[in-house]
Image (tube, helix red, strand yellow):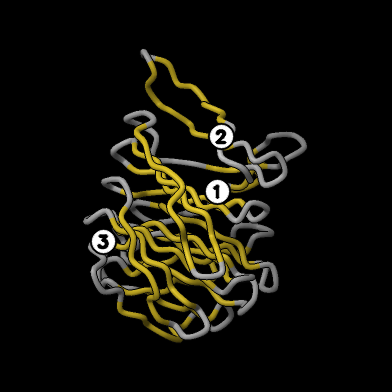
Amino acid sequence: MAIAEDSGEVVFRSPTGDFPDGITYQPKTGRVFVSDKLGGTVSVFDASDGATVGKVALGGEVGNVQYDSVAGTILANAQGSGELVTIDPRRLTIERRLALPNCDANHGLLIDAARRLAFVACEGNARLLVVDLKAMAVVDDLAVGDGPDVLAFDPSARRLYVASESGVVSVFDESANGLVAVGQGRLDPSAHTVAVDSESGLVYFPLEDVDGARILRIMRPTTPR
C-alpha cells in the first residue's frame, strides 16, 4: 500500500503474497521490492503506480530485503536455504549466493553501505552475523536476544540496535575492527521492532501491549554518541 505523505490518502494497493515482511526501494529503477516470508519470493513493483514488475523466487522462507546504495543491488535473506542473496534490480535475477554458517533462520537484515557491511539476524539461534560486502564473507558472529527481528542503524553514532521477539534489545557500536557490544536488556515482550533518528539519536519502539494499550516508546541512549 502506498500512502501520500501530504494528504495521508492511499495512492494504490498491490498484491504482495501470503506474508509480506520486508520492503525496500531502489531509486535508479524506481522499483519497490517486498519479501514474501511464506511465499518464497521477492515481489517487485513500479513505485509510481504499483504495477507488478515481476517476482524473484528464492525458495523456502524469505526474510528481510535491503537496498545496497553503493553496489546498486538488492540483498535478501533466503531463509529457507540459509543464504544471503544478491539480486539484480533490473533483470530480477539472483547474481550471487552467500552461505551463512551458524545462522538458523536468517531473517533480519540491515546494510551499512558506506562501510560495506551487512548485518544478518538469525532468529532461530539468537546470533548476529557481520558480512563484509567487498569480500562477500562472514567476518563476525555475535550473541543477541532470542528471536532477533528488526535492526536499526544510527549512521551518525555508528550504532546498531537489534530488537528481538523475546523483548531483548542488543546495542553495538561499529568500530574500525567490527562491532563492539554496548549493552543488552529486556525492554518489553513486544519490543521486536526498532527505528532510530540519526539526527537526534532517539530510538523508537512501537509496543503493542503495555497494560492493554498500544504505545510508542521513545528512548534516548545513555552511552555517548
Image quadrant assignment for residue 62 = bottom left
Circle 2 residue? 222
SS at badge 2: loop
Q: Kindly identify the amino acid type of the residue bearing the numbered disc 1.
A: Arg
- Position above or below: 197 against 77: above
Looking at the image, which residue is at 55% across and 52% down?
Answer: 159
Label at residue 34: none
Tell whether 219 sits left or right of 105. right
- Position above or below: 87 against 220: below
- Residue 203 on image: x %, y %: 57, 37
Please name which of the two marks, 2 or 3, marks the residue nearer to the observer. 2
Tell whether 172 sits left or right of 26. left
- Residue 48 on image: x %, y %: 69, 59
Mark 1 or 2 closer to N-term? Answer: 1
Circle 1 residue? 13
Q: Residues within 10 Å of mark 3 (few under 14, many from 20)?
A: many
87 and 155: which one is in front? 155
Q: CA distance from mark 2 to mark 3?
A: 32 Å
Marks 2 and 3 in Cβ contact (< 8 Å)? no
Q: Kindly identify the amino acid type of the residue bearing the numbered disc 3.
A: Ala
SS at badge 1: loop
Looking at the image, which residue is at 33% across and 50% down?
Answer: 144
- Residue 155 on image: x %, y %: 64, 56
Total numbered circles: 3
Mark 1 or 3 closer to N-term? Answer: 1
Q: Residue furthest top?
A: 211
Label at residue 105: 3
